[in-house]
Amino acid sequence: MLGTESPQAHLTATAAFCSTLLEPGSLYHFLAEHRREIFADAKFAHLYPSGTGRPSIPASRIASVMVLQTLEGLSDREALDQVRYNLRWKLALGL
């Protein structure tokens, strides 16, 4: 089942308290502002034909992780660590 993002994702604690940490014009800032438009959930719906089961992680979030991982040249494990501990990544991913 296709997981989707909450329309209230911008109300997260990370965004409320740390959004000024993102440098304007940076990739992190760009993804934070436009990730949901570029990687809209509807664009990935055909990959999740079943309407049953546990919802997946939103496709926009997975695609954004892959972009950041590739640009920074990270392994899967290193990318996971960035998602867990790096505030710039959290803001870019809407966490």
Image (cartoon, rainbow, N blue to C red):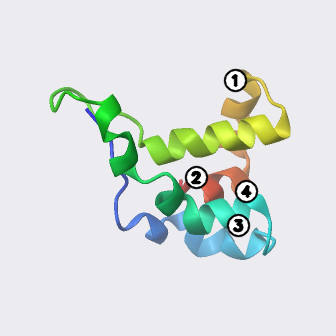
Q: How far apart are the alpha carbons under marks 4 and 2?
A: 9 Å
Is 94 situated left or right of 81 in this image? Answer: left
Q: How far apart are the alpha carbons under marks 3 and 1?
A: 22 Å
Quadrant placement of the N terminus: top left
Q: Position of residue 42 (x, y in %)?
A: 33, 49
Work out whether mark 4 precedes mark 1 in sequence or the reverse, and give the earlier one.
1
Work out whether mark 3 precedes mark 1 in sequence or the reverse, and give the earlier one.
3
Query: Residue 65 is drawn in which quadrant?
Result: top right
Q: How far apart are the alpha carbons under marks 3 and 4?
A: 8 Å
Question: Considering only vertical position in the picture, is 56 above or below 89?
Answer: above
- Label 3 SS: helix
Q: Residues within 10 Å of mark 2 (few under 14, many from 20)?
A: many
Tell me what residue is drawn at x 70 percent, y 66 percent.
29
Q: How far apart are the alpha carbons under marks 2 and 1?
A: 16 Å
Q: Which residue is mark 2?
A: 93
Q: Which residue is mark 3?
A: 29
Work out whether mark 2 precedes mark 1 in sequence or the reverse, and give the earlier one.
1
- Label 4 SS: helix
Work out whether mark 3 precedes mark 4 in sequence or the reverse, and give the earlier one.
3
Q: Which residue is mark 4?
A: 88
Q: Position of residue 81 (x, y in %)?
A: 71, 33
Say if residue 22 shows up in the picture. yes
- Label 1 SS: helix
Work out whether mark 3 precedes mark 2 in sequence or the reverse, and give the earlier one.
3
Q: Are marks 3 and 1 in contact (CB under 8 Å)?
A: no
The amino acid type, in three-letter code, at marker 4 is: Arg
Question: Considering only vertical position in the picture, is 24 above or below 66?
Answer: below
The amino acid type, in three-letter code, at marker 2 is: Leu
Q: Are marks 3 and 2 in contact (CB under 8 Å)?
A: no
In the displayed image of the protein, which residue is found farthest to the left?
Answer: 52
Q: How far apart are the alpha carbons under marks 4 and 1?
A: 17 Å
